[in-house]
């Protein structure tokens, strides 16, 4: 591969600071979070713009905002930092150790992350893994405070920019003994948590003029699976979960297609530890390495992060 000897190389420290600015939404907040002065961060961003030959920030109505090139850089900066951290860990032969804190919203329980986390713990016994399940607002607060290293949640309900996004295809699952009478309200098995995709699913039933009632509601995946298998009602679940647990499909009922489950992986702006990097590798490997999302696939897919139109203003 040809290289340009005259071109300046990207400085990873500049990329890390850039991602911190995106994470915290302003130069002042970033300075306080990473223990640097605001002028120092401003100078770093000027250096980064000079290397790239593009403006990353522009003055907007709400302060300084990311330009088109600034939004585009988010993807490449995340990739560069990830590759650097993973390369150092692998080539140095280091074992992950220390504490890593993972946060997730209640609907993420539908993915069935427990086996993945258990395997991670067995591979890295020196890592102290802590998991917090809470509301998106609290998760984001803990992430910004540096009390969580990684968060998995719906990217549409967090203001932070995700390092990666996934879309999980969903399907209707039913137990073998469930009989549906079109003239009566269909019984539903729901997750006990406000979540965007479930609200969209219920709205699609209303638009299709399906009457429904809540037959069972729980925040536990095991409880939802048991209720569905016993025929208490229909459940909207990831297609991979339906296949894995050999649940029946609600076919021939002309139900509206459920929306995909959107998930994002969010990082703390604090310096990544080896434990955090290895946990992130384990999580992303669960969803697969492909960079495209297909709404028709039954596999978990990883989507390269896209520039978000909901980026915070940078002041």
Image: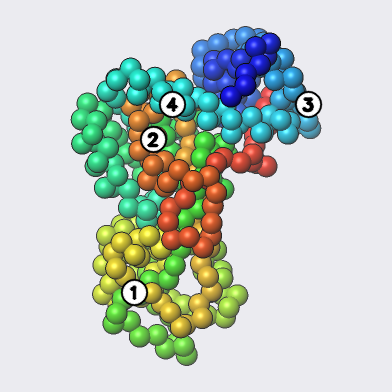
Viewer-nearest of discs 2 and 4: 2
Viewer-nearest of discs 1 and 3: 1
Q: Which picture quadrant has residue 221?
A: bottom left
Query: According to the image, label 2 marks what residue?
Result: 281
Q: Quadrant of the C terminus?
A: top right
Find out whether the residues at labels 2 and 1 contact each other: C-beta distance under 8 Å: no
- Secondary structure under tag 3 reads strand
Query: Residue 247's x, y, as percent?
Result: 31, 70
Label 2, label 4: how many angstroms apart (C-alpha)?
20 Å
Kindly tell me whether residue 137 is visible in this rendering. no
Along the line of sight, which residue is nearer the eye, 197 or 120?
120
Find out whether the residues at labels 2 and 4 contact each other: C-beta distance under 8 Å: no
Label 4, label 3: how many angstroms apart (C-alpha)?
29 Å
What residue is at 52 percent from the left and 36 percent from the top? 163
Q: Residues within 10 Å of mark 2 (few under 14, many from 20)?
A: some
What residue is at 38 percent from the left and 74 percent from the top? 249
Label 4, label 1: how many angstroms apart (C-alpha)?
42 Å
Query: According to the image, label 1 marks what residue?
Result: 248
- Secondary structure under tag 4 reads loop
What residue is at 40 percent from the left and 50 percent from the top? 108
Query: According to the image, label 3 marks what residue?
Result: 59
First along the sequence among labels 2 and 3 = 3
Viewer-nearest of discs 2 and 3: 2
Colour basis: rainbow
Query: According to the image, label 4 marks what residue?
Result: 146
First along the sequence among labels 1 and 3 = 3
- Secondary structure under tag 2 reads helix
Q: Quadrant of the N terminus?
A: top right
First along the sequence among labels 4 and 3 = 3
Q: Residues within 10 Å of mark 3 (few under 14, many from 20)?
A: few
Q: Residues within 10 Å of mark 1 (few under 14, many from 20)?
A: some
């Amino acid at each position: 591969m040809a290289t340009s000897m005259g071109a300046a190389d990207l400085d990873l420290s500049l990329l890390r600071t850039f991602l911190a600015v995106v994470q915290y939404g302003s130069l002042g907040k970033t300075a306080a979070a990473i223990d640097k002065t605001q002028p120092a961060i401003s100078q770093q961003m000027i250096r980064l713009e000079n290397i790239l030959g593009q403006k990353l920030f522009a003055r907007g109505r709400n302060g300084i905002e990311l330009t088109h090139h600034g939004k585009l850089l988010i993807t490449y900066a995340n990739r560069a930092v990830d590759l650097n951290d993973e390369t150092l860990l692998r080539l140095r032969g280091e074992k992950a150790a220390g504490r890593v804190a993972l946060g997730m919203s209640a609907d993420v329980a539908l993915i069935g992350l427990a086996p993945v986390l258990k395997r991670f713990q067995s591979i890295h016994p020196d890592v102290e893994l802590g998991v917090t399940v809470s509301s998106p607002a609290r998760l984001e607060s803990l992430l910004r405070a540096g009390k969580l290293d990684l968060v998995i949640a719906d990217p549409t309900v967090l203001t932070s920019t995700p390092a990666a996004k996934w879309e999980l295809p969903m399907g209707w699952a039913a137990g073998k003994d469930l009989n549906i009478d079109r003239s009566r309200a269909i019984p539903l098995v729901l997750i006990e948590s406000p979540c965007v995709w479930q609200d969209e699913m219920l709205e699609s039933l209303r638009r299709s003029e399906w009457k429904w009632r809540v037959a069972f509601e729980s925040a536990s995946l095991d409880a939802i699976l048991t209720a569905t298998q016993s025929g208490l009602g229909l459940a909207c679940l990831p297609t991979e979960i339906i296949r894995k647990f050999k649940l029946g499909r609600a076919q021939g009922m002309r139900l509206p297609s459920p929306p995909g489950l959107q998930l994002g992986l969010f990082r703390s702006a604090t310096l990544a530890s080896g434990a955090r990097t290895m946990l992130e590798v384990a999580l992303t490997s669960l969803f697969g390495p492909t960079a495209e999302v297909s709404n028709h696939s039954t596999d978990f897919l990883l989507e390269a992060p896209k520039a978000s139109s909901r980026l915070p203003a940078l002041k």
